[in-house]
Amino acid sequence: MIVRKPKFLSVKSVPKLFWSSPKALTISPPPISVLFLVIGLVLFGLGEALLVASGAGVSPWTVLAQGLTQVTSWSIGYSTFIISLIVLFCWIPLKQVPGIGTILNAIIIALVFEYILPILPTFENPLLKIAEAILGVLVTGFGGALYLIANLGPGPRDGLMTGLQKLTNFPIAWVRSGIEITVIFIGWNLGGIVGIGTIIFAFGIGPAVALSMHMLEKIANKTTES
């Protein structure tokens, strides 16, 4: 019996769909691109907030920030800022192009955390905690796909993902999960705290983004054909 690998695990690029902007760096982006960018970023932030609300573990990048605080005595917020700057500098050799999405990424996700996180449900049951963490990964992946397809500039970490994908030509799912696992390893060795939700996010976010892109491309193509 031959077991075929799911097609979405072979996705190697961000598709160009009807809401994709012709250029990432532009002062007059198409309104539909901005609309999908904002929707995607809100969902992205909601997904990450669900992970935090689950109490099953923080994201891999937060583990890295925690670890950095252990060796520098910086705050989590300042450590996260420095990490983001370092990642942005990595864009230069990877030839990544910023846009309004790069700026709105930080603003919108921060707003979602501020106003939505306090009203999200929290559970004591370990299975419900894990279920909420898994939902968070799926929502983050779908939101990430929507806003990346808008092509108005990725956030620091997503830009690292797309840049490394172009450099290596590996599938997006592999590249993203590889980045997250590497970040966990470094953060944990520096003293960051890893939970089951952290592991779920690291292994699940790459496939979640790739699956969402694959599904959105199929739906958009069918709609166009109709």
Image (tube, rainbow, N blue to C red):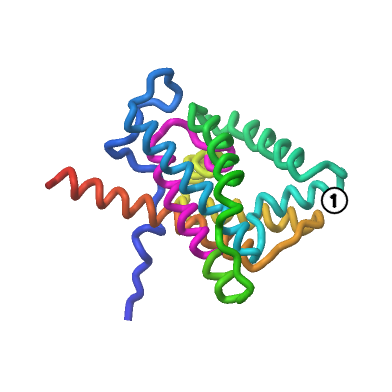
Q: Residue furthest bottom?
A: 1
Residue 187 position (above or below residue 146): below
Residue 92, quarter of the rendered image: top right
Residue 189, quarter of the rendered image: bottom right
Q: How many marks?
A: 1
Q: Position of residue 225 (x, y in %)?
A: 14, 46
**What residue would you read off at disc 1?**
70
Residue 84 in magenta?
no
Looking at the picture, tell me which residue is in the foreground, 52 or 163.
52
Judged left or right of residue 17, residue 207 is right
Q: Which residue: 59% across, 69% down?
A: 129
Q: Which residue: 53% across, 44% down?
A: 161
Name the magenta segment's main secondary structure.
helix
Q: Which residue: 53% across, 42% down?
A: 158
Residue 19 position (above or below residue 208): above
Residue 104 position (above or below residue 68): above
